[in-house]
Image (cartoon, rainbow, N blue to C red):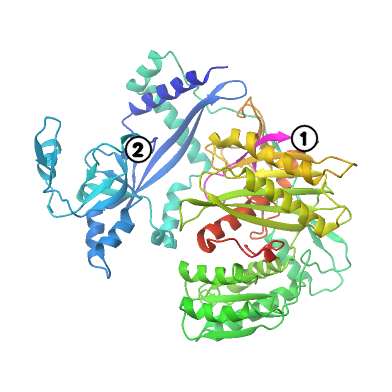
Amino acid sequence: MLSEKAFMILNLMHRQAMGSLKLLTINRHFFDPEAKIAIPQYGLEMYPGYVTSIRQHEQDVLLCVDVTHRVLRTDTCYKMLQNMQRQPGSFKDNFRRLVIGAHVMSVYNQKMYKICDVDFSVSPSSSFGTKDGSSITFMDYYRKQYNITIRDPNQPLLVVSLPSERISSSPILLVPELCRLTGITDDMRRDFRLMCTLADHAHVLPDKRIEQLESFNERLQNAPASREVFQLWKTELERQLIEVPARILPRESIGFPLVGGAVQHVPAGPEAANFGRQLHRIQMQKSNPTTGTRMFKTVPLQHWCVVCVQGKEDLTNYFVRCLTQVARGMDFNISQPRIVTLENDSSLAYVRVLSELVNDGDLQLVMCIVPNDRADRYSVIKRKCYVDGALPCQVIKTRTITPKNGNVRTLMSVATKVVIQLNCKLGGIPWMVKNPLSTAMIVGIDVCHDTADKSKSYGAMVATMYAPKQVEPKYFSTIERHPRGEELSNFIGSGISKALHSYQTSFGAGNLPRRIIVYRDGVGEGQLRGVVDFEVKKIKQQLAQVYANVKEFKPQLSVIVVNKRINTRLFMADRNPPPGTIVDDIITLPERTDFYLISQTVRQGTVSPTAYNVVYDEGGLNIDQLQVYTSKQTHLYYNWCGTIAVPAVCQYAHKLAFMTAQYLHSQPNQRLENQLYYL
């Protein structure tokens, strides 16, 4: 096995070879300007590129390559400045908000820079000092150095963010006229057609991705400049993609209870990993009371309220009728709600109404129908319900509940999803899978950074708890704020302790789980050692305290790091592998117990596997059993009628952390900790 320095040299050698192909370097990745994709109707260009890494795998040293894309705007920063000057408000403040933190590419040398400020006190007509001690204006410099004439001598200059080791040096200033913004804005993300256009180019089908990878390999090996680099270092690349052994798990059975009390297990769709059709059949079969099925557990919704803006009462009432019709077919009892109308859609109007509703002890849930997706109003609604009170809340846009092209049937699909969410937020369970571990606690952990205060982060923990002779699981969630960069070990240890106390509250004071499986998300490659050295140690300390008086058994702990942001891609011939595909050899790492699992399907492009790294294991399950159980957990996310890329507890933890960091900016009310209110 080669040393770390040897792999550093190999990666540097490979980057030298790629650099000889005249590729553009953006954030350490290489992009091909000659193969750019123009999208003129939106003023964008997409640069295809490659992400590469060389490291030791099970037996061989392998090069991992993936195809990626970078979006650049055809307009310059100066054009954006002119647009800001035509808009209401301070154009200086608006322009600063637009460019600060953004990455720009200079048009004269195609280098990338991150903008940290805009200096309106200097301009291209200002002078700066040169190395020989003389001074020159920016306009003269660009004319002499690049033969570029700057048209507006009065525009401000962009200040570049410097690395920490260069903070003491003079700042780098850029001319907006000569810079192009990269990436897309939030407004662009809300443009459905634009995003579909980008997806058509970025989501590459497996056969096309294979062609691109093979073409890249051929170009890298046959180009004279890159071949010279490989010959100098006496190295050679394989001509073909590597083949790996894999196995495909049997289709999981989804459990829905029959009217008589028995549980009917229906196989998930063959390759779709989507069991929405089963839920649709539930509604159809309900017309026959002897054979009808229903959601696994429902909680009657008897006292609830719908808040809407004046003038949307008819639309609201019609959607409520759709909800009750769909719920009836799923054996979910929804009573007629109280409709509250607002004079306007201001945040203050919602605050006044919700302040009264959260104090209504009989109210089970409130639904807010809002005209658009304004983040400030959404934040106010969620804070009022989840921080000031403990009232489950569902927010829906009027566009979502408006029939498309006047076709009322389009609402039934929306109503089905909303009914499932409402049931979950009340404590219901839509479906289950066969659980081979009768006494276990499955934990998911994730982290999100506070958008209002970059120095803070929120760590969320969600636990699904199973007990003997208990058909349905219980849920627990907790979240804690901590300074960004601080170790999460203290929070994780205390969170595990809280979850175990909740387990005893739910299933009896003398009951504790035999197995605890922790799926840790949000961990980078360089943080793995910290998980093992600090977080596992804290968990063990808490377990020792909680189980101190338990003589019959000791807790069996497994900790698995989950990583879905990887560049590895798997192909079955020239198509995507089916859900349930597992690879645990050749491309895995020799120093770890790790595996790749494809648990979901994609409608566009190439499916991405999820990497699982078992960093601590005394759970008593062999690796095959752990893989099967992990696959089962990907079927239990109730915001989607199908499998997802990670275990459900990880996605729940992400939802909770994201909502808190993005909108609440404070810990939710503890009275909600046993409900999936964050769906």
Which mark, by number, is residue 618? 1
Q: Residue at x 58, y 20 (%)?
A: 60
Q: Residue at x 55, y 76 (%)?
A: 369
The residue under label 1 is which amino acid type? Answer: Glu
Residue 15, compared with residue 145, is above or below; it is above
Label pair 2/1, CB-CB below 8 angstroms: no
Image coordinates of residue 250 in percent, x first then y, are: 75, 44
Q: Quadrant of residue 472?
A: bottom right
Give the left or right position of residue 360, taking residue 288 as reference.
Answer: left
Residue 332, compared with residue 234, is above or below; it is below
Could you tell me how far apart the alpha carbons at marks 2 and 1 are, in whole angstroms?
Answer: 43 Å
Image coordinates of residue 494 in percent, x first then y, are: 68, 49
The residue under label 2 is which amino acid type? Answer: Pro
Q: Which residue is mark 2?
A: 163
Q: Quadrant of the C terminus?
A: bottom right
Please tell me which of labels 2 and 1 falls first in the chain: 2
Which of discs 2 and 1 lies nearer the camera? The answer is: 2
On the question of residue 646 being in view, the answer is no
Region rendered in magenta: 595-619
Q: Quadrant of the N terminus?
A: top right
Local crowd at mark 1 within 10 Å, few (<14), some, or many (≥20)?
some
On the question of residue 489 being in view, the answer is yes
Q: Nearer the viewer, residue 14 or 390?
A: 390
Is residue 613 highlighted in magenta? yes
Image coordinates of residue 490 in percent, x first then y, are: 63, 45
Q: Quadrant of residue 299?
A: bottom right
